[in-house]
Image: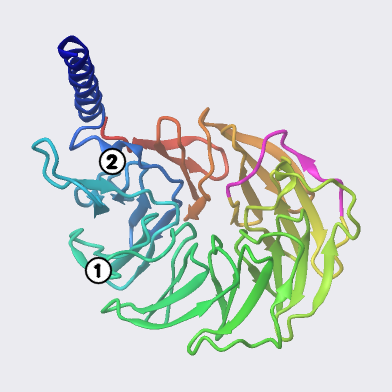
Amino acid sequence: MWIKHNKILLSKILLLLVMLLVVLSGLTVFGCIGIGATSKGWSGVTVEDGTLFLGSMEGKLVAVDVSTHNRLFPDVTLETSAPTGGGFGCAASSTAVAIYGTPAVAGDLVYVGGYNGKCYAINSISGALRWVYPRQGNLDGHIVGSLVVFQGRVYIGCSDGKLYVLDTATGDKQWEFQTGDKIWSTPAIDGDTLYIGSFDKKLYALDATSGKEKWGEPFETQGAIVSTPLVYNNTVYIGSFDRHVYAVDAINGKQIWQFPAEDETENKPENWFWAKPIAYDNVIYAPCLDGKVYILDAENGHELVDAIDLESPISSSPVLVDSSIIIASEEGLIYSLDTANNQIKPLADVEEKIDAPLCASEGVVYVHTQKDETLYALNAQTGMVLWSLPLSSK
């Protein structure tokens, strides 16, 4: 019995030692400082008063002076306290927060949504934190889409299915609106109306001041809506995961047309519309994850020419520069589409994955890449790299 008892005791001791080694090795791998390395995201760029603002894949707000290409202030890490901490001599740690949406700027503040379900208001000159919402805890979901600032309010879509509206100066909540599923879409505001899509397959029109629904009922598609609505000539254009682009009357929410008119293609992820479409001269340019750009008559949805195939998914929202549309494929190729003849030409190859929406200002296109995370400034006419800035701190 004594021998048997000691064998059992020895086995327990060995097991405890193995578990301790696993825990200690885990602390070595993750550490009290290494958790934040998991932050990712595909933030776009905002240009305001000569400064570029974007979120890095390390969970930091980056501010770059357009003229000098230098940081305006040290990168600001969006942090959230880890839910647990302490053991084995470690203090409670902080984790850097992934940033997927493009920052919004108004006055002396830049607003950033974190994947942790918090909104941060940061001084656009110094980088000092002004306020955070919610003050305690987090929202019940992630912030994936970009924030929108309009007439003293910040509009935030959240994956808990709610649209939150905050006071820009204080961060106090003014009202919220509940949809039927996650919100990844960025709101679009035209006049006094806000349009927002949801995973519940519906497009909503709300009074931007009160949050009251304007249509009798939301417009419904057959798939989740992640694309940002485009408002053009009193019509809302929206892409859906049902592989259709819809034109909806902005006043009454009734469908004007859908493209394709019939279900010509099987509904697969590679056929979803994710990027925001572009409108120019009564033509809608709709990029798709199938690698094609569909060129549609804005009034009736008919294809004006055959779709242009870039042979790589398009998740980055394009930009309009003069009369050319600049488009980025996921594989890192940048193209210029001439709207006069709908001919496309290669503009640049950054050889890095691109998911973030493009940004254009004063003839320059800004591209935020992912693999080696670099911010590129390209001449919109020639594609020449004017300058580039690595964003990683490694």
Residue placed under numbered mark 1 in the picture: 136
Q: Which residues are magenta?
A: 304-316
* Quarter the C terminus occupies: top left
- Name the residue furthest top: 3
The label number, if any, that marks residue 40 in the structure image: none
| Residue 308 is a magenta residue | yes
Q: Secondary structure at mark 1?
A: loop
The nearer-to-camera label among 2 and 1 is 1
| Residue 150 is a magenta residue | no
Residue drawn where x is 40% and y is 35% of the image: 373
Q: Nearer the viewer, residue 116 or 312?
A: 116
Residue drawn where x is 20% and y is 24% of the image: 16
Which picture quadrant has residue 10?
top left
Question: Is residue 254 at all visible to an observer of this figure?
Answer: yes
In the rendered structure, which amino acid carries the disc numbered 1? Gln
Q: Secondary structure at mark 2?
A: helix
In the rendered structure, which amino acid carries the disc numbered 2? Gly
Instruction: First in sequence, mark 2 or 1: give its number.
Output: 2
Q: Main secondary structure of the magenta part?
A: loop
- In the image, taking residue 66 as reference, residue 220 lies left or right, namely right
Q: Position of residue 245 (x, y in %)?
A: 76, 60
Q: Position of residue 69 (x, y in %)?
A: 30, 44
Binning the other alpha carbons within 10 Å of mark 2 as few (below 14), some (14 to 19) or many (20 upward) gives many
- In the image, taking residue 233 as reference, residue 123 lies left or right, namely left
Residue placed under numbered mark 2 in the picture: 36
